[in-house]
Amino acid sequence: MIDCGEGTQIRMRQMDIKTNRLGHIFISHLHGDHVFGLIGLISSFGMLNRTADLYIHSVPELENILRPQLDFFCEGLPFRVIFEPFNPKTHTLIFEDRSVEVYTIPLKHRIASSGFLFREKPHERHIIRDMIDFYKIPVSMIRKIKQGEDFITESGEIIPNEQLTKAADKSISFAYCSDTAYSEKIIPIIQQVDCLYHEATFMEHEAARAKSTLHSTTIQAATIAKKANVGKLIIGHYSARYKDKNDLLEEAKTIFKNTFAAEDMKSFGI
Amino acid sequence: MIDCGEGTQIRMRQMDIKTNRLGHIFISHLHGDHVFGLIGLISSFGMLNRTADLYIHSVPELENILRPQLDFFCEGLPFRVIFEPFNPKTHTLIFEDRSVEVYTIPLKHRIASSGFLFREKPHERHIIRDMIDFYKIPVSMIRKIKQGEDFITESGEIIPNEQLTKAADKSISFAYCSDTAYSEKIIPIIQQVDCLYHEATFMEHEAARAKSTLHSTTIQAATIAKKANVGKLIIGHYSARYKDKNDLLEEAKTIFKNTFAAEDMKSFGI
């Protein structure tokens, strides 16, 4: 999960999201709309008798804020809450498991703020069953073949991997950049991601306000998407002054056509 | 406002409740489902440039929990948050203004918990315009006449108040009792209130669980209502195990007919 504003646990229930699959929460920055839902979420997990560790990745200060609340409201929690502090000023690998890597993306906001880049690790190649049978390749070798190795027959003949496998599925990447002012420094980091979420708090005519509050406009978000050559852009974090999200979406599309507008409880495929 | 669970500010927006009319919040006890919405509500009030003081009435510990969050997340708040601690073990007047008095109601729960009794002060009597004109009663006297004084004419004749006014509107009273186990000690305090909200976490067949968790059953809530001879009973705070509130309502009604079931965003007249 990325960020956890007030009401997150309520939305999760409404959307029937399986909470026990959630192991890691990445917090971009310590403004209330990104963290006020944590204590309620954790408290409810406790009542649901969760036992799996829950990791919270954030700037170091969050533990000082949340720990006293956990001690007071969540005594006897049946699982551990583990704080994993990161430095929001550097682009660093902060998490990986066997299928994904997560990197910070330094952003430009009123307080220390970090985006997150999620990059799937390369998938294994697909074996061509007929060729495996033809060369009588033992089961113990299959894993390495999937990972790209050639096969050497008993007679010493080298069978190139390309004859035994088909290309792996594409690894997917997603970048989340909020809250942030327009910053071209993030472009090399998010270059060619399949999907970019970039905040677009304001319409372009409020560019001065975007600058002073260190937020972005629709045009700025779309410009970043275009310059980074991403697959698709999702905008969000709209100022409450805009009643119709469509105005923001249409403005962003003038720069980057493949733009979509985030909405409460809306899902996007990548 | 009584209690402030997570998502309260969201519900207020959905129900179009005017937030600047809210001056006092009464917190029954420090379990998360009664307080986790406070920080978000206060934070949003700050962004809406509220300037009026906000009073929070609760046990003293709340300030220790909330103050560090206010300092961190709500720096430069344009209004004051004033904590008004009370002792939840005594039945005491904790607030009054020209129209209402608020009293604590000691409850029986796992942690210190207090209900609240809201009692409107007596309304003024309605003047009978024709009689006022007939006796040429000066405007400066009207307020006192409304408050029940007799009028003395220039010739010294005493006109009894009953000839000049009609009875005042009934003053309304409301008692809120949650979270609590069954406790007959509250009956004298809430005797004959117009409306009683009493928690009914469990159906009667879970009476053992109600006892061990210090909550009430439907039958217990209704028994309190009956013994206190209240006008109407609203039950709520149902365990998530019950999919159909109607079962709880019907069970309560077997003891106290004028019972209603609280639901998210439902309003009740008193």
Image (cartoon, coloured by chain):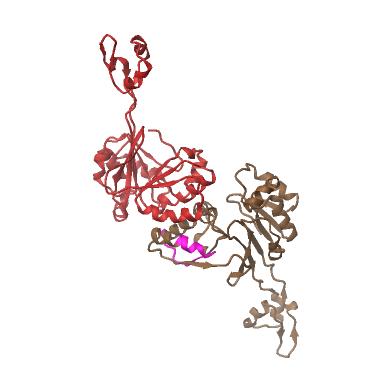
Chain colours: A brown, B red
Foreground: B259 or A92? A92
Verify whether residue A58 appears in magenta. yes
Horizontal side of B270 relative to A152 (left or right) equals left
Q: Name the image quarter holding the N terminus of chain A.
A: bottom right
Horizontal side of B229 relative to A103 (left or right) equals left
Verify whether residue B106 appears in magenta. no
Q: Height in image: A228 above or below B3? A: below
Residue A193 in sight: no
- The quarter of the picture where residue A178 lies is bottom right
Query: x, y percentage for residue A53?
Result: 47, 67
Query: x, y percentage for residue B164?
Result: 31, 15
- Rendered residue at 74%/57% (across/down): A226
- The quarter of the picture where residue B25 lies is top left
- Rendered residue at 38%/64% (across/down): A76
- Rendered residue at 25%/11% (across/down): B156
Horizontal side of B145 relative to A150 (left or right) equals left
Q: Residue furthest bottom?
A: A155
Q: Name the image quarter holding the C terminus of chain A.
A: bottom right
Q: Which residues are magenta?
A: A47-66
- Rendered residue at 37%/14% (across/down): B129
Query: x, y percentage for residue B254?
Result: 30, 40
Q: Height in image: B16 above or below B130? A: below
Foreground: B222 or A101? A101
Residue B75 in sight: yes
Q: Residue furthest front?
A: B154
